[in-house]
């Protein structure tokens, strides 16, 4: 039972940043398309929504990318220049 709960928590640790990155991408897309919509009553560019979307997108992608990189580094799947440095005795 304990293994199931720990795996569920691990899945949530990847799903939440994924949803955050998806929402950020959609917020940036919506703010860009709002400018070109002739029926929109918004004048100007919605900078707040765009910046919030950019931050959420970058944070989600960075978390998932970092998690993947450190997992692959632990299993020695990365190129030699990215492997952990060993101390010389």
Image (spheres, rainbow, N blue to C red):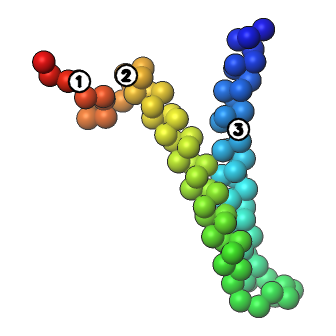
Q: Position of residue 13 (x, y in %)?
A: 67, 34
Tag in front: 3 or 1: 1
Q: Which quadrant of the rendered structure holds the N terminus?
A: top right
Q: Residue at x 40, y 27 (%)?
A: 73
Query: Is residue 35 something one can see in this rendering?
Result: yes
Q: Nearer the viewer, residue 38 or 75?
A: 75
The picture places residue 8, in percent across and down from the top left corner, at: 74, 23
Q: Mark 1 near mark 2, Cβ–Cβ under 8 Å? A: no
Q: CA distance from mark 2 to mark 3?
A: 25 Å
Mark 2 lies on residue: 76
Q: Quadrant of residue 12?
A: top right
- Residue beneath disc 1: 86
10 Å crowding of disc 1: few (<14), some (14-19), many (20+): few
Percent of width and height locating residue 35: 72, 83
Residue at figure coordinates x 49%, y 40% from the top left: 66
Residue at 57% x, 48% y is: 61
On screen, residue 32 above or below 53: below
- Marks 3 and 1 sit apart, C-alpha to C-alpha, by 33 Å
Query: Is there any visible trace of residue 29 in the rendered image?
Result: no
Left/right placement of residue 76 relative to residue 53 reads left
Mark 1–mark 2 Cα distance, whole angstroms, equals 14 Å
> Counting other residues with Cα less than 10 Å from the Cα at mark 2, is it few (<14), some (14-19), or many (20 or more)?
few
Q: Position of residue 46 (x, y in %)?
A: 71, 80
Q: Say whether disc 2 or disc 3 marks the residue closer to the N-terminus.
A: 3
Residue reaching furthest left? 89
* Residue 68 vertical position relative to residue 44 in the rendered view, above or below: above
Side (left or right) of 86 relative to 59 = left
Dot 3 falls on a residue whose secondary structure is helix
Is tag 1's residue or tag 2's residue first in the polypeptide sequence?
Answer: 2
């Amino acid at each position: 039972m304990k293994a199931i709960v720990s795996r569920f928590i691990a899945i949530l640790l990847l799903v939440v940043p994924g949803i955050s990155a998806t929402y950020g991408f959609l917020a940036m897309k919506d703010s860009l398309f709002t400018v070109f919509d002739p029926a929109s009553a918004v004048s100007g560019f919605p900078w707040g929504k765009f910046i919030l979307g950019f931050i959420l997108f970058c944070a989600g992608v960075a978390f998932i990318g970092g998690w993947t990189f450190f997992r692959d580094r632990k299993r020695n799947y990365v190129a030699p220049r990215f492997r952990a440095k060993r101390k010389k005795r």
